[in-house]
């Protein structure tokens, strides 16, 4: 597939410098670009690499000052990465599965499938479930009883959705993910753990994307909620009754324990552990591998790191101080020696003086 | 479904205060309770919230002193959470799958299925496997050759059990979990890793519950063992030849390396990492995200935290000390200044004295 | 199955001490050995345990000096563990699936299956995919469009391979693993995260083994690459555009973020977190649970530990110093007291002297 610079510039509403009749055959990263590829540059830092790459064209931020002449075609835009995402989609359009119910799919009683729903081979849709228009379910999925899936959602192959889970519109769920399994709730009584029934549900709001091999437990009573626009990476654990707000980002292997609340626009780094009944207020940022203890509140906009987590400046400050601990100890040893010497001298002085006094 | 307070009180052998003819329609948490709901309160801390909630009835600990009058019906019991678990099951009974072998299930040769066994759509039971009475296997499960599953066990959808794994009675396994995969064993020889065959098995004892997306490897030689009544949360890793005792709790994303031993009644917090050949003695508690180094023994009843883990008092003590490190350093700087001044003064004194001595 | 010591010694090219006509019926670990079992001993440390075990025979390193007489048969070799791996395979040969395409497997159009390929029940092979000779795909696998799988590879049951993934020869992939899911890439614009299309692929080189429930994302643009002979344990996360070299070992629950590079022969301990754009140079070793910050380079052959990671000697040194922080603080307090006393004495001395001077 070939696109001219003119076509691509129109797509992203950009301004062309250079040859707008040039044909582009693909998108690439700066390292891998070949002739006829287009690449994007967000800031001056990568400009030289882009100009010396084999790419034939660049999508460039209007903010970048282009001092040298170049034979490459250039498209100027306000947001080059966003624009480039559109260009990628032009070369790699989302191929919707042919909207059919595969003959091996098992659709149980009282299931409502809207128009243009696609269900992959061997998937099982249990009774009383509803799937909205234009949504697709991959191969080998198990969609439980009484589940609701909205419109334009994509459930990739091999996803397991337990009963009563609610998934809204434009949600994407990757393979191996399990939503709605029982929360980890027990009553310890007479030396044994007795299961506390987990009878709540899970609500996944609009525009959420969930990676592969993620586990999201149902509420014990009430709901586990993933808010609109939130993105969850692979192998993340979300426990029962967790509430996550809008437009949050949870990196891979994060664990969130029972009943914790993550407000809006929170960023959680990889492998962070959040204990139970924690609150991460709006806009807080949790550094990778940090640990937030039970019941802790991280205030609005605060960035924290470490286990137990502290404000990141404190963490770095303390870290630097521990780094120089051996030096500090040596200084203390030296002080002790000086002090001992001084003390001895003083005693001598005293004695001298006393002697003197005796003499006088 | 409606239940009277009288019926519920009989179920949990409790004492009623107030109107025992009151009808209850559901269970709820304190935050979400509506009229006609029943809630439970374990201690005084949540009593006010319960009394001001919309719930019509409370299950209350006998230990709580109820000073104010209330229109809500109250059921007094010794163990309110345990009692409430029973009430939840009354409103949400476990719906056993209709005991049938789904026509799409593949049952290979020489498989023994006891009475009232249920096998879900598309599940595959390989040859020489035995499943006990009243056990159920969900949709899309793969149960390997020579597997034994006991009675009253629930294998949820999309579980993979490798050959020769033994699962006893009343075991629950959630979706996405893999049991019996090869342990991570190699011989490094001439610059390459050669696979050390993993020919042991896995034994899951009675009353174990295993969360979703858990990985439990088979023994290299001999067995990996999960002891009776132990509960394992989502995304946990259990390596080859690990032995876990009775009534342990492993929170989400814990990793246990090869040949480590966890005795009885051990509690392991989320994201804890346990290296190989570790022993966690009976009743020890490992704080979230802690790391236990190779070969380490954590003594009976000890609580530890940090990486490498230390007794929790030490951890907190040291943590507080690192917190005040900047202050400590400033004190050392001040001491050095004072010392330098003192030294100078002393020198002056000495000189003075010498002068004086000279004078005298 | 019985094997004589003579047969086993020939298999591993070892030298026999004792009765070479002895029959051996199985392999075992030292703890579980029974009569007629053979065990292996790599170093003197376990020799006594081996000699007093019930095993009838030992595979022993030529380096071990055997001072006491024993009735056990002994086979001496240079590399006992490697030799023992061969003996295990003799007793537990790899049983190849009968090379057939199960009638329930769905093979879409234009799929090329080489000779002796085996496809398990209910597996789905999408169009334009190629599988090499002697490779096997388990039960319930989804192999996407345009996938290439080489020769002698084993894809266990319930594995999901997205479109365009390339898997070479003698690769082993365990159950629950997902390869080729979308990387975690978004453009934040006007308060929302917009998906950055993930249109690259994944390449798994020869002799790689991947554990269960692993997530490996496809490149955004370009490839995610797992190099020849590398071994990946369970529940590991590999993000988009990660490049891993040859003969690396990644223990369980490791997370590697986007665009990081791991060179050859690197060892990564369990639960290690590697941020984006990191480089781990050849032969570096990362201790369990360590965290490597964004953009960091770990030099050739270096061993590091902690978060953020430092050279392991530094880590241990600092750790020991933090351990003695309370003592250090007490020493500082004592110094302050002494100093205060000294200062007071000096003042007195000074006063005395002044008085004396006045007197004189």
Image (spheres, coloured by chain):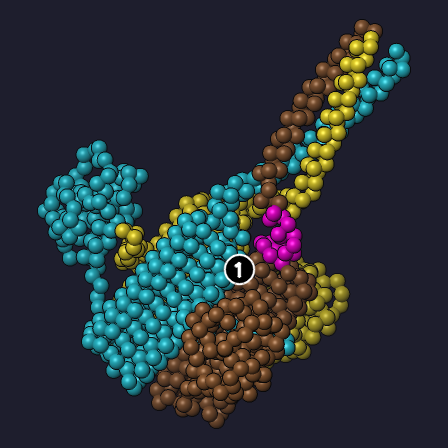
Chain colours: A brown, B yellow, C cyan
Write down the residue under mark 1. C294
Q: Say which of B157 and B338 sits in front.
A: B338
Residue occupying image coordinates x 25% and y 70%: C151
- Marker count (numbered): 1
Q: Which residue range is magenta in the image?
A: A304-320
Residue farthest along the bottom direction in this orientation: A115
Quarter assignment of residue A341: top right
Q: Note whether residue C315 is visible.
A: yes
Residue occupying image coordinates x 53% and y 57%: C293
**Residue A230, percent from left and from top:** 57, 74
Residue occupying image coordinates x 25% and y 82%: C103
- Check residue A308 for magenta coloring: yes
Q: Say which of B148 and C345 sits in front.
A: C345
**Residue B68, percent from left and from top:** 76, 65
**Residue A286, percent from left and from top:** 60, 62
**Residue C9, percent from left and from top:** 15, 48
Q: Quadrant of the C terminus of chain C?
A: top right
Q: Say which of A259 and A25 sits in front.
A: A25
Residue farthest along the left direction in this orientation: C21
Q: Secondary structure at mark 1?
A: loop
Q: Local crowd at mark 1 within 10 Å, few (<14), some, or many (≥20)?
A: some
């Amino acid at each position: 597939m070939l696109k001219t610079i003119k076509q691509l510039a129109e797509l992203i509403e950009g301004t062309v410098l250079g040859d707008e009749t040039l044909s582009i055959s693909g998108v690439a990263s700066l390292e891998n670009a070949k002739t006829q590829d287009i690449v994007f540059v967000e800031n001056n830092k990568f400009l030289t690499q882009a100009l010396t790459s084999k790419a034939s064209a660049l999508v460039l931020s209007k903010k970048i000052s282009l001092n040298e002449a170049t034979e490459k075609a250039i498209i100027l835009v306000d947001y080059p990465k966003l624009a480039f995402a559109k260009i990628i989609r032009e070369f790699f359009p989302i191929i919707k599965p042919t909207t059919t119910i595969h003959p091996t799919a098992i659709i149980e009683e009282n299931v409502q499938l809207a128009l243009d729903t696609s269900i992959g081979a061997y998937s099982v849709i249990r009774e009383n479930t509803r799937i909205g228009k234009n949504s697709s379910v991959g191969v080998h999925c198990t969609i439980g009883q009484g589940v609701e899936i909205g419109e334009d959602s994509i459930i990739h192959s091999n996803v397991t959705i337990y009963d009563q889970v609610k998934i809204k519109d434009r949600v994407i769920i990757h393979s191996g993910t399990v939503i709605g399994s029982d929360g980890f709730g027990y009553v310890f009584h007479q030396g044994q753990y007795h299961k506390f029934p987990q009878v709540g549900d899970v609500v996944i709001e609009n525009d959420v994307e969930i990676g592969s091999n993620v586990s999201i437990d149902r509420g014990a009573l009430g709901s586990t909620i993933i808010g609109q626009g939130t993105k969850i990476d692979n192998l993340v654990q979300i426990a029962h009754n967790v509430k996550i707000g809008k437009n949050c980002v949870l990196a891979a292997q994060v664990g969130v324990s029972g009943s914790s609340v993550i407000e809006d626009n929170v960023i959680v780094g990889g492998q962070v552990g959040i204990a139970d009944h924690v609150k991460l207020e709006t806009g807080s940022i949790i550094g990778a591998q940090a640990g937030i203890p039970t019941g802790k509140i991280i205030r609005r906009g605060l960035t924290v790191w470490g286990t137990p987590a502290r404000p990141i400046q404190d963490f770095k400050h303390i870290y630097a101080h521990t780094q120089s601990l051996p030096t500090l100890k040596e200084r203390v040893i030296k002080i002790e020696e000086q002090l001992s010497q001084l003390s001895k001298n003083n005693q001598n002085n005293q004695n001298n003086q006393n002697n003197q006094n005796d003499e006088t």
